[in-house]
Amino acid sequence: MRAASFIQRLHNKKPKLGKAVSFSAATGVILANSFGGGLPLWFMGATKILTGAKIADATVIRIADHWIRSNNAVIDNLLPKKDWRINLPDNVRPDGQYLLISNHQSWVDTSIVQYISEDRLPLTRFFTKFELIYIPIVGQAFYFLDFPMMRRHSKEAIAKNPALKDQDIIEAKRACELLKDKPFTLLNYLEGTRFTPEKKAKQASPYKYLLKPKAGGLSLAISALGSQIDGILDMTIVYPDGKPNYADLWKGDITRLGVDVRHIDMPKPLFDAIVAGNYEKDAEVKAEMFTWLDDVWAKKDALIDTMLAEFATPKAD
C-alpha cells in the first residue's frame, strides 16, 4: 500500500514520471500473470478437455479470476485519482447467466467490463475468431474458458457454397451451449467494430454516437441460451476526454469515465420466436428484431448525451 500511495503522489507531483511508473508496474503485473499462470492454465485446461473434470474447469476459471483481480488492483492502487462514474443494477449476481450488449469505442472497453464486473457479474466471455487459438497463452485461455470461438467463412466463400452459412450458425450455437451449465456474462458488441466518425459516415448511421447495430450475434446467443438466461443487460460506456488506446489505461490517462449498465426487456413473443430459431427463417421476426434494436440504440444514443452532459458538472465529493 505504501508503494501504491507513493505512485499516486508521483502522478500529482511529476505526472510524466508517474505515468511511466504506472505503465511499467502494470506491464510487469500483466506479464507476470501471463507467464506465471500460463503453465497452470495449460495443464488444467488440457485436463479439462481430456477428462471433463469439473475441478479442472473451476481451476481454469480461478486463474482467470486472479488475472482480472490483479489488473483491477493495478487500476485501483497504481493510477491517479479518477472520476469514474459507474452505475450497475442491484439485482445482478456473480452466479447468474446474462447476455450483455454494449457500444464499442476502444480496446479498453473489455478491461472496463472486467473492472466493473468484479464480485458483481460472472466472468465475461465474448465471441472471438477461432484463429486466435494460435496466439500463445491468450488464445488458449479463450479456448479453455469456453469463449465462443467461431470459424467464420467469408462472404465470397458463402456465395460459392451457401451451406457454409448454416455451418457458421451451427458452430456458433455449439460454442454458446458450452456455457449452459455455468455462470456467464456473454458480451456482444452489436456494432461489430469500434466506433469512428469515418465508419459512422460510411454507413450513414442515424445515431449521433453509435454505428448501426447488428442482430446476428445476439440472436444466435438467444437461440442457444435464451431459455435459461437471467436477463439481457445493456452497457453504455463513455470517455468524456476522447477515445483512449490501451496504453492510456495503464498510464492513468483515463481520469474520467462513465459506465451505465441496466436491464432491458425484449418483447416476449419476439424472444420466444428467436429461441425457437425463427430469426434466420422468418423475415418478419428479423424485421421485428431490428425494430426493437433500433429503439434500444436510440435510447442509448440519448443516454450518451446525458452522461456526457453530467461530466460538465464536477462530481460532488
Image: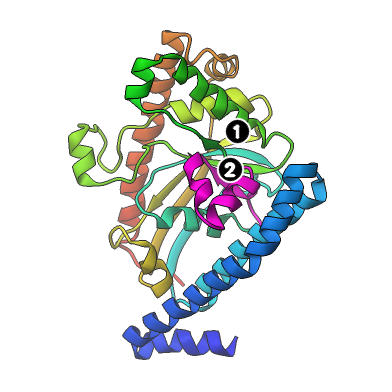
Q: Is residue 152 left or right of residue 73?
A: left
Task: Please check the rendered image and state whether residue 123 is part of the magenta-colored stretch, yes or no.
Answer: yes
| Magenta segment boundaries in residue numbering | 119-147
| Place of residue 185 in the rendered image (x, y in percent of width and height, measured from the top left) | 60, 43
Q: Which residue is mark 1?
A: 175
Residue at the spot x=81%, y=46% of the render? Answer: 54
Neighbour tally class for label 2: few under 14, some 14-19, many 20 plus, Cα within 10 Å: many
Graded by Cα atoms within 10 Å as few (under 14), some (14 to 19) or many (20 or more), the crowding at tag 1 reads some
User: From what the image shows, is residue 226 above or below residue 189?
Assistant: above
| Mark closer to the chain start, 1 or 2 | 2
The answer to whether residue 23 is magenta is no
Q: State how the image is colored.
A: rainbow
Q: Nearer the viewer, residue 95 or 177?
A: 177
In the image, residue 199 above or below residue 139: above
Q: Is residue 248 above or below residue 287?
A: below
Above or below, comparing residue 306 to residue 202 in the picture: below
The answer to whether residue 150 is left or right of residue 83 is: right
Secondary structure of the residue carrying tag 2 is loop
x%, y% of residue 299?
A: 37, 36
SS state under label 1: helix
Residue identifier under label 2:
147
Residue type pointed to by label 2: Phe
Along the viewing direction, whichever of 230 and 165 lies nearer the viewer: 165
